Image (cartoon, rainbow, N blue to C red):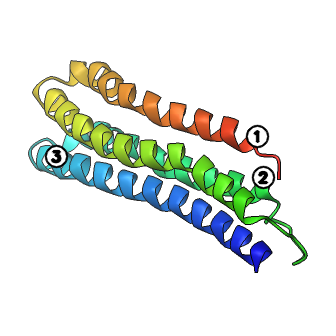
Amino acid sequence: MESITGIVLVFIGAAITAILGFVGSVIGMGYAGQAAAGVVGEKPSLFGKMLLMQALPGSQGIYGLVGAFLILNFSGVLGNDGSLVIATSTGVMYLVAGLPIAISGLLSGIYQGIVAASGISLIAKDEANTGRAVTLAAMIETWAIFGVLISFILLISING
């Protein structure tokens, strides 16, 4: 039972890491998409710039996916022939190691979408503001990247 619990915790950690990143991206892209749809209705020529702004919060979902893959890979679950044994305490470590990516992805995805939506309004007023709008939204991305970095450091520190 001990080895099954450890593997289940690894799966839970990978799932939480991916799901929270996905949710952050979905919500953030939703905010930006709503703003972009209003602008494109009035100025169809801005569609490409609006799409760029909407896509920015999508990276957190990618980070969550990468984090889940890293957890499964570092734990040895990927490519396992069924004989893998993971202690419960080690499973907990893998679960906890995914939390920085998961939480920073969730929150930064949401807030990046809010900033991107404001940037969309900025671009709608003057297309010359596109670089500024992208930069403002990209600043929030920094925290998701830090979450990836901390999770990676935690993962390489686990001694099963």
Left or right of 10, for residue 99: left
The quarter in which the N terminus is drawn is bottom right
Q: How many angstroms separate mark 3 from mark 2 (CA)? A: 40 Å
Is 51 or 30 nearer to us in this picture? 30
For residue 46, side relative to residue 63 (left or right): left
Depth check, front residue: 119 or 69: 69
Q: Earlier in the sequence, mark 3 or mark 2?
A: 3
Q: Mark 3: which amino acid?
A: Ala
Q: Helix, strand or loop at disc 1?
A: helix
CB atoms of marks 1 and 2 within 8 Å: yes
* Mark 1 → mark 2, Cα distance in angstroms: 8 Å
- Viewer-proximal residue among 99 and 107: 99
Among the 4 quarters of the image, the one containing residue 51: top left
Q: Residues within 10 Å of mark 3 (few under 14, many from 20)?
A: many
Hey, what amino acid is under mark 1? Ile
The label shown at residue 43 is none
User: What residue is pinned by disc 3?
Assistant: 35
Circle 2 residue: 74
